[in-house]
Amino acid sequence: MALLFSLICITFGSAAQAHPIAAEITAHQLRLTLGKTHVTVDYQVWIPNSHLVEEPQETNPLQTHLQEAKDGLSLLINDNPTALTLLPLEGSGVQPGGHVTGFQVALQAELPSQMGRQEVLLVNSVEPDELANYNTEVFIHPSLQVLETSLLDLEEGELTANRHAQWRMDEESRETHVVVRKHPRILQFTSTGKFRPIHKALGFPWMALMALGIGGLAIALAAARIMQHRKHR
């Protein structure tokens, strides 16, 4: 788990350097990772330094903004408010720059173990009165499948719009909604490998079922040949 989180942080940190509109607009970048047992949130907000200068003098304004980044994210799981636990970062949560300053936090919450279906809603209330850009990524554990999400539009089973990892300026991007469920038990052994981006975790795993069907047919044919061979002995 620690290795996975470190890799996520490294990837997220480097990607966040690509501020979409260099220095004039606040930018929010968020990665939501749904695992088998936990939800992990990696979040970074880039605030123009001109906005920081305009604010009244404080004892430590950078730490104040970092605290706001921690407190401004709220999580609901199955309509229940769920506490987010702060995770340690490898470096500082404040990244000063020439034109913008970044504030980064990592948070985690436990998923209810008894639930086969999980509904997750993450709400971003950081810098609520600022015009901003938003970039949201969602990654899904291979044992889970996505039923609904605010990042994708589907029409008659076809994907018509994908907002995963896309910079946008609409306020709707402050909320990230995902509904997942566990794969049927018969498919659990196929649910291994890397976390998948949300658009690759949709629907029922037909390829896995096909593999099971082909494997079952091969076993049945082998058994029939053995029985036939025994009859002829």
Image (spheres, grey):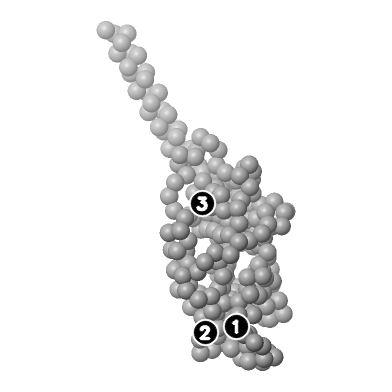
List x then y, in percent, for residue 223. Answer: 36, 20
Counting the numbered discs, the total is 3
Question: Mark 3 or mark 2: which is in front?
Answer: 2
The amino acid on which the numbered mark 2 sits, given as a three-letter code, is: Pro
Query: Residue at point 63% right, 70% down?
Result: 70
Tell me if residue 74 comes above or below residue 202 in the rendering.
below
- Using the rendered image of the protein, determine whether residue 187 is visible from the camera's viewpoint: yes
Please tell me whether residue 180 is drawn above or below residue 41 in the rendered image.
above
In x, y percent, where is residue 162? Answer: 57, 62
- Closest to the observer: 10 or 61? 61
3D distance between C-alphas at marks 1 and 2: 9 Å
Disc 2 target residue:
96
Mark 2 surroundings within 10 Å by alpha-carbon count, few (fewer than 14), some (14 through 19), many (20 or more): some
- Distance between mark 3 and mark 2 Cα atoms: 33 Å
**Number of the label disc, if any, that sits on residue 141:** 3
Specify the quadrant of the image occupied by residue 126: bottom right
80 vs 207, nearest the viewer: 80
Of the residues shown, which amino acid type is indicated by label 3?
His
- Secondary element under disc 1, as helix, strand or loop, is helix
Mark 1–mark 3 distance (CA, rounded to whole Å): 35 Å
Residue picked out by circle 1: 62
Mark 1: amino acid: Leu
The answer to which of marks 3 and 2 sits earlier in the sequence is: 2
Q: Circles 1 and 2: CB distance less than 8 Å?
A: yes
Front residue of this view, candidates 68 and 140: 68
Please tell me in which quadrant of the rendered image residue 54 appears. bottom right
Which residue is nearer to you in this view: 199 or 72? 72
